[in-house]
Image: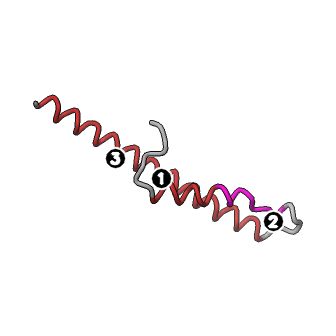
Amino acid sequence: MENTRMMRRKTREQRRKLMRKQKLYGLVFVLLSILICLVCATGKTPEDRDATAVVLLLPFGLYLIFTKEICISG
């Protein structure tokens, strides 16, 4: 009985740790998207103003922040 409680507590702690890590990754992706937008705003040529990466990074970062599922592996 005690062993089962310890196992549940351990898995709960592992889940919390993974969720914190996932939310941190999401925040990094969102900040990276903002940085890309700032760099693109100062570009002179169309190639310098290409912000295609934001199309992928921003939605994925927001998903990682707001989902309750674990999307990353430990």
Please give the residue where the numbered disc 3 appears in the rendered image: 16
**Which of the pair 24/59 is nearer the observer?**
59
Q: Position of residue 16 (x, y in %)?
A: 34, 47
Q: Which residues are magenta?
A: 48-56
The relative height of residue 51 versus residue 7 in the rendered view (above or below) is: below
Q: Residue at position x 28%, y 42% from top?
A: 12
Question: Could you give the CA–CA distance between mark 3 and mark 2, rounded to whole angstroms?
Answer: 39 Å
Residue 32: percent from left, percent from top: 62, 58
Give the residue pinned by disc 1: 24
Quadrant of residue 49 within the rendered picture: bottom right
Helix, strand or loop for disc 3 = helix
Q: Which mark is residue 49?
A: 2
Vertical position of residue 4 compared to residue 46: above or below: above
- 60 drawn magenta: no
Residue type highlighted by circle 1? Leu
Q: Residue at x 10, y 30 (%)?
A: 1
Queried whether the magenta region covers residue 52, the answer comes back as yes
Picture coordinates of residue 46 (x, y %)? 87, 65
Q: How many marks?
A: 3
Q: What kind of element bears circle 2? A: loop
Element class at badge 1: helix
Marks 1 and 2, Cα distance to the nearest angstrom? Answer: 27 Å
